């Protein structure tokens, strides 16, 4: 044993070890350069994903030699996003390198905001606005998963950015993010969850809380009193439906045939181009009501990557239009239907009318 240690610690053995380290670094370096070239020049989505995925896992550590400065996993995720959008001629997202040699994105017309990817322990990369620290979406390149974060979308766009930008500007800002999600699904077979950006009429956005006090719906009824909108009771007293312009219907209801009777929002429009997010963005009355009662009305985030809820969800691959019809608040009354009946305040001890409005102000 002593002889073995002596041989390993001899000058010749050390030189050999150093030479092997150089060979290893050169081999890794060449592979690294090849992946960078592939990431920068390929016009094939699969090759782009392969290069980005391998770069995020590339280990350039060597005991003898310090590898020259290189980027981190978050940077390769940003470069991947920028390249995929570039391949689809989407120019409203600009990717640049900052003074810390990190790649950040700007999204037109939010030129004052900076977005970075923050990579978690499980490999999920969160596209995060730096000032408000809101992770707008998560993606995992190796698992081919993508999902929007409902809470962050509301926090950033509806609560924060709408104070500085118009609803049309924010609609334009969200479009390239939806396009990116659609490209991941169409080009690379990603499983995507669009959350409150989904425009399918059959999509239901379940509330985080299992129960809902009917006084919350009464408060929306009170708000419609000074507008041309009409709030209608749904059959079997299963909820309410707000009739908006352009044939758009906004529901808050539960399925009376489902034993769980979970409350959920739904948006129905003839062209399936309007999402729950669009309703919050474009209709001030609904937005004020939702935010004032957010503890009760918050929409559950169905997690694909970071499980915040006890119940798992089955992911679906789906895409939505990137240029939805912009709803406008009407100056003439919305059309009425014969089946629903107007909402009446509850008579089971729930607060209604003026008292409901005072509760909302509280």
Image: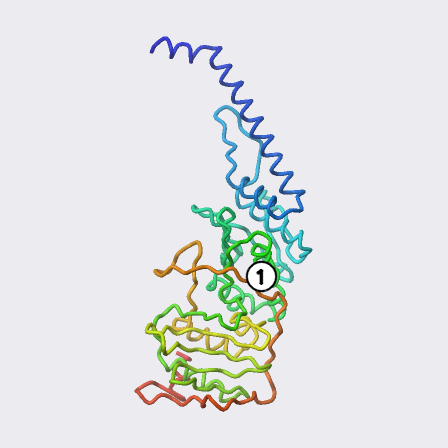
- In the displayed structure, does residue 222 sit left or right of residue 246? left
- Is the N terminus in the top left, top right, bottom left or bottom right quadrant? top left
- Residue under the image location 56 percent in, 40 percent down: 71
Residue 362 in percent (x, y) is at 39, 78
Residue 203 in percent (x, y) is at 48, 70
- Residue under the image location 50 percent in, 31 percent down: 61
- In the displayed structure, does residue 287 sit left or right of residue 180? left
Q: Residue furthest top?
A: 3
- With respect to residue 40, does 312 lie above or below? below
Task: Mark 1: give few (<14), some (14-19) or many (20+) Cα within 10 Å.
Answer: many
Which residue is under mark 1? 178
- With respect to residue 39, does 227 lie above or below? below
- Residue under the image location 60 percent in, 89 percent down: 332
Residue sitting nearer the eye, 107 or 266: 266
Residue 25 in percent (x, y) is at 55, 26
Please count the marks in the image.
1
- Residue under the image location 42 percent in, 83 percent down: 219
* Secondary structure type for disc 1: helix
Residue 349: quarter of image: bottom left
Q: Residue furthest front?
A: 257
Residue sitting nearer the eye, 95 or 325: 325
- With respect to residue 115, does 164 lie above or below? below
Residue 4: quarter of image: top left
Residue sitting nearer the eye, 329 or 202: 202
Q: Residue furthest left?
A: 349
Residue 15 in percent (x, y) is at 51, 14
Q: How is the image coloured?
A: rainbow
């Amino acid at each position: 044993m002593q002889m073995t240690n002596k041989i390993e610690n001899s000058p010749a053995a050390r030189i050999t070890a150093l030479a092997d380290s150089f060979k290893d670094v050169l081999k890794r370096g060449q592979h690294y350069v090849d992946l960078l070239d592939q990431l920068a020049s390929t016009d094939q989505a699969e090759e782009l994903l392969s290069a980005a995925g391998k770069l995020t896992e590339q280990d350039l550590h060597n005991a003898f030699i310090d590898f020259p400065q290189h980027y981190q996993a978050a940077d390769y995720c940003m470069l991947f996003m920028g390249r995929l959008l570039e391949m689809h001629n989407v120019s409203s997202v600009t990717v640049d390198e900052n003074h810390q040699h990190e790649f950040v994105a700007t999204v037109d017309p939010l030129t004052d905001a900076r977005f970075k990817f923050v990579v978690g322990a499980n490999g999920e990369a969160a596209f995060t606005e730096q000032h408000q620290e809101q992770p707008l979406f998560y993606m995992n390149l190796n698992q081919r998963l993508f999902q929007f974060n409902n809470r962050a979308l509301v926090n950033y766009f509806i609560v924060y950015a709408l104070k500085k930008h118009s609803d049309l500007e924010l609609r334009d800002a969200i479009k390239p993010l939806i396009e990116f999600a659609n490209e991941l699904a169409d080009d690379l077979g990603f499983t995507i969850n669009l959350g409150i950006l989904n425009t399918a009429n059959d999509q239901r956005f379940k509330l985080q809380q299992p129960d809902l006090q009917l006084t919350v719906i009464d408060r929306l009824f009170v708000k419609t009193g000074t507008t041309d909108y009409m709030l209608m009771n749904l059959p079997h007293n299963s909820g309410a439906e707000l009739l908006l312009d352009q044939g758009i219907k906004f529901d808050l209801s539960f399925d009376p045939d489902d034993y769980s009777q979970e409350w959920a929002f739904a948006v129905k429009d003839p062209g399936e181009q309007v999402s729950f997010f669009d309703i919050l963005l474009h209709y001030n009355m609904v937005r004020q009501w939702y935010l004032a009662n957010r503890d009760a009305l918050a929409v559950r985030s169905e997690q694909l990557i970071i499980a915040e809820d006890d119940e798992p969800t089955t992911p679906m691959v789906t895409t939505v239009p990137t240029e939805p019809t912009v709803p406008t608040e009407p100056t003439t009354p919305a059309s009425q239907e014969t089946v629903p009946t107007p909402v009446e305040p509850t008579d089971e001890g729930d607060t209604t009318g003026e008292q409901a409005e005072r509760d909302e102000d509280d």
